[in-house]
Amino acid sequence: MENLVIVDLGSNSVRMVINEVHDDGSFHEVRRIKEDSRISEGMGANSILQPVAMDRTIAALKRFKHIYEGYPNRTVRGIATAAVRVAQNQAEFLKRVQDEVGIDLDVLSGSDEAYYDYLGVMNSLEIKDCLILDTGGASCELIHVQNGKPRNLISVPFGAVSLSERFHLNNVVRADRLFAAQIFVNKQFRDIWWIMDAMQLPIILLGGANRSLARMNRQHQGMSRVDNIHGYRLKTEVVNKTFRALLSRNLANRKKMPGLETQRADIIIGGILPLVMLLQMLDADRVIFSESGVREGIISEYVQNRK
């Protein structure tokens, strides 16, 4: 038996999951932890990681290291996604992580990130035809699945943090800024040549903003296990109603909405906007939430390669 540690440095949060992997190929999760380090904060048009954001993220990685060093026979896999992927000072940051934490971060390409999303979803949900949407802090991954296979996949360079900062969606949302954001997202999606092949398919949702959407609605419905979102379904009209409710509130009032993490309230509109635009474009009638994504895809690949 060994302990597989995956440290996942996303654009908005950094997560660690530890799984016990057994000789027969089975595995189960023994520890999961998340910190909202927001490495992509303030990167701007020049895509430069800011010193405060780097310090905050490295501090979180050090706290994770203190935890996983207590697990014997461990293998540590560190990955970084969109924010580090596009950063002009990527090499500087990666060197700091190696020097200060001792982790060699593997910077996933957009295609790799999307493929691991696909593996994670397909190994945990019984669905053959769908469109997977993973909304991160600085990118969105889209995967068109047909007959259980990834027909097309892509990573587009915008997400909850970058949209919120670029179009000032953090607090009171002005109509002209929302309209500009909608036009921008719509154009980016329509430039994907295969996107209309996913017309009327269910959309499988990953990412922090989408998880918040699920929790808010489970809380509203009075469900006892609010965080148990895997396989949870919502109709399109419910998604749109929730989006309108968010738009009608300023930041202070959004922080009071049940089920929404206060530290995500400033980026939730930018985080849900890509989904709202896709639902309209593809005439999809429902969404399905998945708790399995990149990390679970990596675990599946790792176990398969051990055989």
Image (cartoon, rainbow, N blue to C red):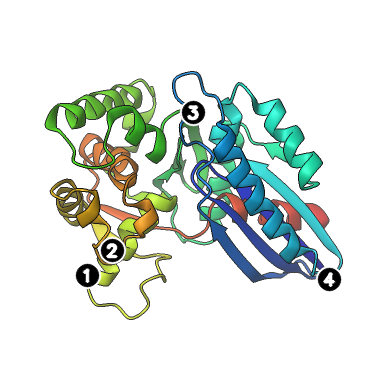
Checking the image for residue 220, the label placed there is 1
Is residue 64 toward the left or the right of residue 51 in the image? Answer: right
Is residue 146 toward the left or the right of residue 234 in the image? Answer: right
Q: Residue at x 44, y 20 (%)?
A: 45
Distance from the alpha carbon under mark 4 to that under mark 2: 38 Å
Q: Position of residue 116 (x, y in %)?
A: 59, 45
Q: Position of residue 292 (x, y in %)?
A: 52, 58
Q: Determine whether the residue tagged by mark 3 lies in a helix, strand or loop.
A: loop
Q: Determine whether the residue tagged by mark 4 lies in a helix, strand or loop.
A: loop
Pointer 4 local density, CA inside 10 Å: few below 14, some 14–19, many at least 20: some
Distance from the alpha carbon under mark 2 to that under mark 3: 29 Å
Q: Is there CB contact under 8 Å for labels 2 and 1?
A: yes
Disc 2: which residue: 216
Sequence-wise, which precedes: disc 3 or disc 1?
Answer: 3
Q: Determine whether the residue tagged by mark 1 lies in a helix, strand or loop.
A: helix
Disc 3: which residue: 43
Is residue 119 toward the left or the right of residue 253 in the image? Answer: right
Distance from the alpha carbon under mark 2 to that under mark 1: 6 Å
For marks 4 and 1, give the one nearer the viewer. Answer: 1
**Quick one: which residue is furthest to the right in this view?**
73
Distance from the alpha carbon under mark 4 to that under mark 3: 41 Å
Sequence-wise, which precedes: disc 2 or disc 3?
Answer: 3
